[in-house]
Image (cartoon, helix red, strand yellow):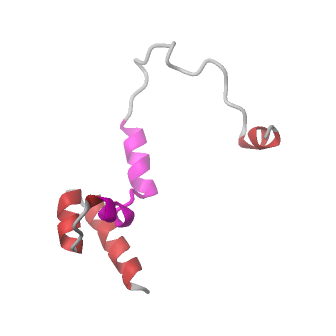
């Protein structure tokens, strides 16, 4: 395990615990928040929770996609 891995893991755990990104910046000893964002990336669980909290039931139909998106393989074949 490298120091980078330890710092990254700690930053993600702090972020998941609801600690403010500026506090994480100070804890890691960074001057810039840009540096902290490298360590405190949002993980897949946090992304899933964010998506689950979005309700699109009342979204106007003009905003919704009218035609289904092609599958990934169809998209790649079309490149």
The magenta region covers 34-53
Location of residue 55 in the rendering, given as x and y in whole percent from the top left corner: 39, 28
Location of residue 19 in the rendering, given as x and y in whole percent from the top left corner: 20, 60
**Residue 40 belongs to the span the image colors magenta:** yes
Q: Main secondary structure of the magenta part?
A: helix
Which residue is depicted at the point 22% across and 65% down? 24
Depth order, front residue of 14/24: 24
Q: Is residue 55 above or below residue 39?
A: above
Q: Is residue 67 above or below residue 30?
A: above
Using residue 33 as the reference point, say whether residue 9 is left or right of it.
right
Location of residue 72 in the rendering, given as x and y in whole percent from the top left corner: 72, 42
Depth order, front residue of 72/49: 72
**Residue 72 belongs to the span the image colors magenta:** no
Considering every residue shown, the one lying at the far bottom of the view is: 1
Using residue 5 as the reference point, say whether residue 10 is left or right of it.
left
Q: Is residue 18 visible?
A: no
Quadrant (top left/top right/bottom left/bottom right) for the N terminus: bottom left
Q: Is residue 55 visible?
A: yes
Which quarter of the picture shows residue 36? bottom left
Which residue is depicted at the point 40% across and 17% down? 58
Quadrant (top left/top right/bottom left/bottom right) for the C terminus: top right
Considering every residue shown, the one lying at the far front of the view is: 31
Which residue is depicted at the point 42% across and 55% down? 45
């Amino acid at each position: 395990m490298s120091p980078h891995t330890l710092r990254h893991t700690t930053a993600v755990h702090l972020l998941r615990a609801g600690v403010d990104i500026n506090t994480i910046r100070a804890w890691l000893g960074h001057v810039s928040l840009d540096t902290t964002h490298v360590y405190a990336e949002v993980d897949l669980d946090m992304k899933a929770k964010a998506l689950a909290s979005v309700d699109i039931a009342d979204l106007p139909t003009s905003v919704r996609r009218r035609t289904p998106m092609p599958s990934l393989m169809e998209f790649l074949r079309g490149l």
